[in-house]
Image (cartoon, rainbow, N blue to C red):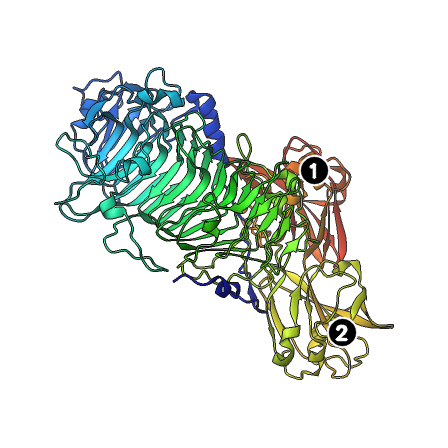
Amino acid sequence: MAQSKAAAVTMGATTLAASLAGTSNILALPGDEVMKKLGESIRSDASNAKVVTSTPAATSGTIYYVDPSGNDSNNGTSQSTPWQTIQKVNTITFAPGDMILFKAGGFWELSVALHPLGSGSASAPIVIGAYGSGAKPRFSAKNIALPWTATDGTTHYASDALYLENQQYVEIRDLDISSKPDGYTGTAAESAKLFDRRGIHIVGGNNTTQTVLQGFKLHDLYIHDVAGEWQSVSAAGWDPSKRTAGILFEIIVKGANGLPVVANPVSVTGYQPTWFSNVSIENNILLNNSFGGIIIKQLAAWGARQDASSPDYDVTGWYPNTNITIQNNYLDHNGSDWAADTIYLTCSKDSVVRHNVSSGAGTSGIELYFTDNITVEWNEVYGAKQKPTGSDSNAIDTDKATTNALVQYNYLHDNGDGILLCGFIYGSSVYRYNVIKDSAPGKRYMNIHGDKGNNYIYNNVFYNSGSQAATFVNSSGGSAYLADSNNFEYFYNNIFYSPNATSTVADGTSVTYDSNSYFGVAAVPAEDIHAIVGDPQFMNVLAVLGGAGNGVNLNGLKLKTSSPLIGAGKVISSHPSTNIAVAPMTDLEGKSVLGASTDIGVYVAQPDLINMTVGDTANAADWSIRRNLQVGNTLYGDRTLTITTLPALYLGADWIRAANDSKAYTGATLVSFTVTRNATVYVASDDRIVTKPGWLAAWTATTDKLVETEGSVARNYTIYKKEFAANALVSLGASGSTSYNNYAVMVKPVVANMVVGDTANAASWSVLSNIQPGDTLYGDRTVSVNALPTAYAGADWIRTANGSKNYTGATLLGFTVTRNSTVYVAIDDRITTVPSWLSTWTATPDKLIDNEAGTTRPFSIYQKSYAANSQVTLGNTGSTSYNNYAVLVK
């Protein structure tokens, strides 16, 4: 049931409770840099499409070899006795575990589709792949043209390079597939050269019992220049439309001519539903395929969804494809005016689209249609444009009857529209932790164009870096779509950032705004009573990277410690009218985000204390967790006392603003909370309390003082400290006096007050806990910790920027240790002359080993001891050629 706009405003009221489950030290990034580099290299030189699996693994079946120089009279079971033709392969019904391997560098000009018969099993799939090293075996289907007549009397020609029908448990890998007619260049004027073409065509249908076809794995393929004709849904209807592609899975009814019936709709009389399940499409390069790159379909009779009730949206008679995984693919459609959607997932449920790179799509980079419970995450989509053959130009489109779509951690930049919310009939979605940058002038970063649904849009960054005005939120269909009593959009904790031009955020009665940040926006929605207007204080917004030739780097969108957006967000506790759970939820860096102290934007400044519980319930409302302690802060939530003096060590700390009236509380536990990482907790106790409470006996008194002032009266507080391990529960008793002021609480991690001299790359540095093998070593480069002696595992550490190796200043890094510590520096062994500042450090016999795309490198570890509250200063790495150092603290 759709909720009212007013009701939604009260969702998730802020409480004192918070939860931060931990930090993942494996740094994920939108897209896939390795696949992007490979795809771009193949786009520039097709000979870079090499065989990945050159030697077949052991199998329970028979391995058959095919070589253009072979002979079909051979037995095909050895590389010295291979078959020669596709026709020979098509005569064989293969068994589970069998492999059909084509010689690397071989070429087959097809006159019929490759159509091996038989199915594998869950434990022994049939494999279609390559053997030998070098170029992938090539297959061209440009000469296949099987005629069929459309309902309007026109003649079309069908062409598939590889075809499977009602088969299961098949793995396809290491093939180069194309279907490019002679003279075709991909321009809009060449419609006569387009056929009903597909590269890989996997179908099911004509079954008289319900049938699930499953167990498909397609990987390490190069599929390109499949010149398929374009049939739109509006013109041709659902069943005949959008069924030409590089890879197409679809359900069909087969006609008397042996080809799929093409009609609107296709009649399924006499047949039972068929659908696909457990399909994996990953690590493929797909270039310039039309209509689409990867398409998953179902017939309208079994795939079209009618109206249904939230949150589950169950529909009688709906037979969707299930468990589809599309990941780590590079799809580039820049070379064809006919190449539209790079990924088109329809009539599917419980599936995921992740870590793909989409460039130059027409219509949509990733489009969902008639789907439920799909996660679209960690994708990079750029260059989507309105092509002469289409109308839309968006990065992601949650379209008709798409429900429970979770769209998160994507980088969408330099497209037409960024996101199209097109939930006709009904729809529901959550868009969170996405970066939408530089949509085209005249287009929209968020295009609201549905007529029924509930869409939650929170903790995203909408960034216009250009000098032309941008439209962050509006509808291509007019203001009526922003005032539809059946269609609701909720914008929370987003950053609308337009530093060089005045941009717009449209509002309407069905759109809700709360706790968003606005910079360079013409008119802030009046209802956003918690709006923060002004500079969000990004660390280095100009360093945001992505697109052709670049890896993705969004670290510049981290907030400075002085940002007003830290802790200013709205708590998200539920997504009404959906079945999408809020948890688990992390920011772009993997830090878990739940509860109070929510930040605005895509990166969380990790709080050091969470889950506060106040025993003095009468005054609990005046207690709060605060960030960035500074001189001038108000010390208590119920009394005007100002901090006037505080040693530098404590500045910037997370802290608890207590209620002064809680000094009267005499229970055993006044406050408890959890520290999120190895930390030192400090308690500042009023010096007028001569006899300190008994629980402070286990704490260490420091010589430091906090001074507060009330009017003209100044009072001193002695600071006590105690060390706690990550995730420890800290319980503090009563103040010890009902006459004098309550205590203050501050928390500092072991590694505190980090300052990076290389300001250009500072956003890629971060302080982390619990280093382990597998962690990502740098904030700006995909290098992992391959091996680490057990003595160092679990240490606090600093993820540095590899780009800081180019810094030549005297001090690259400074920080404070809040307890007696040993600091370790791991320096690349390729640096033969270590920097002079390391001369006072002790070399250990230990090594840290890194791993970058399979290449490992040793780092020697140096150590030095520091007393609590010491300043640690490290110089530059000593080489601009090799990797930057890593820093560990124990």
At x 36%, y 15%, the residue is 183
User: For this rendering, which residue is in front, 683 or 848?
Assistant: 683
User: Which circle's residue, 2 or 1, is located before the other in the chain?
Assistant: 2
Horizontal side of residue 866 vs 42, given as left or right: right
Residue 134: in sight, yes or no?
A: no
Task: Check contact, mark 2 vs mark 1: CB within 8 A.
Answer: no
Estimate the x, y position of residue 595 in percent, counting from the top left.
55, 63
Rendered image: mark on residue 350: none
Q: Which residue is mark 1?
A: 877
Estimate the x, y position of residue 629 in percent, counting from the top left.
73, 61
Q: Which residue is mark 2?
A: 685
Mark 1, other Cα within 10 Å: few <14 / some 14–19 / many ≥20: many
658, above or below 265, in the image = below
Residue 848: in sight, yes or no?
A: yes
User: For this rendering, which residue is in front, 443 or 872?
Assistant: 443
Q: Amino acid at mark 1?
A: Thr
Estimate the x, y position of residue 814 in percent, counting from the top left.
74, 48
